[in-house]
């Protein structure tokens, strides 16, 4: 697989699939620039070599199509809002093309001078993008002489710009960007070069979202710590009273099966002993601590309790490899952030003591950033679904296409 360090882009027009799917506030200001910032090294390498750059990305999930964008209906999904920040970071003007499929856009890209940068409009304004349409991919490929995929966050999608397009470039003319390479290298450290004890920390709302990754990790991990809303499905499956905590009633048997499978594989699935419970889902609710098998009616678990925090932290701090995906509670509310904060601190402490730690998934990344610990862990991934699918043992189309 080609990496961009192996190529000199002098006098070459590089078409780069980036992941500029960043959050925008009501005034279209970027509220988290991480994904853009992590793409800059790839872009700068090509410009420094003496090449030119055509950038393509998606933003959000627009439904109206390009026609209604022109009418202002999907203004919030236009990549034009990215231009000022990107121009500042690259210290160069950005040419924005509001229709990636127009004759005007192709005239612009084919006449690019070395050092110039073009940003194409949101590819998801075109239905053909998510359909993985070959004609659309072929058309997009005409924007560049070489193709670089640096969008790990969409590597699990067989979309026109993320995998299909690679077929229209010679093997020696398609590359993995710096960000994509870093994501893959760090994920494979856990998958293929695991140091033990290996602890996986899984949180979030639904156990159904994590079934496949739990199944795969049972063959690799020593400990699987489960927090967040998904934990209560396990407690109800075990016969506990969980009040009005989040639960997936159709997944109770599956939860028991996972516990049994882990036991047979000598893997410890560790559930939180207690929770911070509340009588309502808001930061002003009444709260108290309860054993997770005995949550009163009308109350719900919104964070792991102090005993669980202590148990989880001890396991994490004694680990050599750590994967964290998903918060321990509703950390966005200050009353229910302590569990997630404790986990973040434990991961940072373990890392300082020599463990390799990988943080992945939007909420986990938001948490590690909220607590200012991102620089104290080994690697923070930009990929949510892509990282999960990699750990589920699946092949990612965006990576496969580069081989």
Image: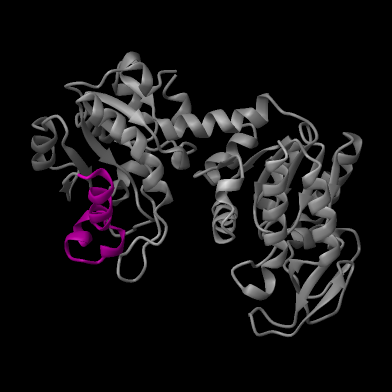
Closest to the observer, 130 or 307: 307
At x 29%, y 46%, the residue is: 123
Measured as percent of width and height from the top left, residue 51 is found at: 20, 27
Query: 377 above or below 195?
Result: below
Q: Judge from the rendering whether residue 307 lies leftward or rightward of residue 347; answer left or right.
A: right
- On the question of residue 219 being in view, the answer is yes
Magenta-drawn stretch contains 45: no
Per the image, is 81 magenta?
Answer: yes
**In the displayed structure image, the side of residue 97 where residue 14 appears, left or right:** right
- 259 vs 43: above or below: below
Residue 150 figure quarter = top left
- Magenta span dominant secondary structure: helix
Q: Is residue 202 left or right of residue 19?
A: right
The image shows residue 76 at horizontal and vertical percentages of 30, 63
Span of residues in magenta = 66-91
Measured as percent of width and height from the top left, residue 228 is found at 71, 61
**Where in the figure is residue 337, as x and y percent of width and height?**
67, 67
Quarter that holds the C terminus = top left
Name the foreground residue: 368 vs 69: 368
Extreme residue in the front direction: 352
**In the picture shown, does residue 351 fall above or below 182?**
below
Q: Quadrant of residue 45?
A: top left
Residue at 19% across, 25% down: 50
Number of disc labels: 0
Residue plotted at (33% across, 42% down): 129
Specify the color scheme.
Answer: one colour
Give the side of residue 149 with respect to residue 118, left or right.
right
Q: Quadrant of the N terminus?
A: top left
* Residue at x-position 66% and y-position 58%: 327
Res 396 visible: no
């Amino acid at each position: 697989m080609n990496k961009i360090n192996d190529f000199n882009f002098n006098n070459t027009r590089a078409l780069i699939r980036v992941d500029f799917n960043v959050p925008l506030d009501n005034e279209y200001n970027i509220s988290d620039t991480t994904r853009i910032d992590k793409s800059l090294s790839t872009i700068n390498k090509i410009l420094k070599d003496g090449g030119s750059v055509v950038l393509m990305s998606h933003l959000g999930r627009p439904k109206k199509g390009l026609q209604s964008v022109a009418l202002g209906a999907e203004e919030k999904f236009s990549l034009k809002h990215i231009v000022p920040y990107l121009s500042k970071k690259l210290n160069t003007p950005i040419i924005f093309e509001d229709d990636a499929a127009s004759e005007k856009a192709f005239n612009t890209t084919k006449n690019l001078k070395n050092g110039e940068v073009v940003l194409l409009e949101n590819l998801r304004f075109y239905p053909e993008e998510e359909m993985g349409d070959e004609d659309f991919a072929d058309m997009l490929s005409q924007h560049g002489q070489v193709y670089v995929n640096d969008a790990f966050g969409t590597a699990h999608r067989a979309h026109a710009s993320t995998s299909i397009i690679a077929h229209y470039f010679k093997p020696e003319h398609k590359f993995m960007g710096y960000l994509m390479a870093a994501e893959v290298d760090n994920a494979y450290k856990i998958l293929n070069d695991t140091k033990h004890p290996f602890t996986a920390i899984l949180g979030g709302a639904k156990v159904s979202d994590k079934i496949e990754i739990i199944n795969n990790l049972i063959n690799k991990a020593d400990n699987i710590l489960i927090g967040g809303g998904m934990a209560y499905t396990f407690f109800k499956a075990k016969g506990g009273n969980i009040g009005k905590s989040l639960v997936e009633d159709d997944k109770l048997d599956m939860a028991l099966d996972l516990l049994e499978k882990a036991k047979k594989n000598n893997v410890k699935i560790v559930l939180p002993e207690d929770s911070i419970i509340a009588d309502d889902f808001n930061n002003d609710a009444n709260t108290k601590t309860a054993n997770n098998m005995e949550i009163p009616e009308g109350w719900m678990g919104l964070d792991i309790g102090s005993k669980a925090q202590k148990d989880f932290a001890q396991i994490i701090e004694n680990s050599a490899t750590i994967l964290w995906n998903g918060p321990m509670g509703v950390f966005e509310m200050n009353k229910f952030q302590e569990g997630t904060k404790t986990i973040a601190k434990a991961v940072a402490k373990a890392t300082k003591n020599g463990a390799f730690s990988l943080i992945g998934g939007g909420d986990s990344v938001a948490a590690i950033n909220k607590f200012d610990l991102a620089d104290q862990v080994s690697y923070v991934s930009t990929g949510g679904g892509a990282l999960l699918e990699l750990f589920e043992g699946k092949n990612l189309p965006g990576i496969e296409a580069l081989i």
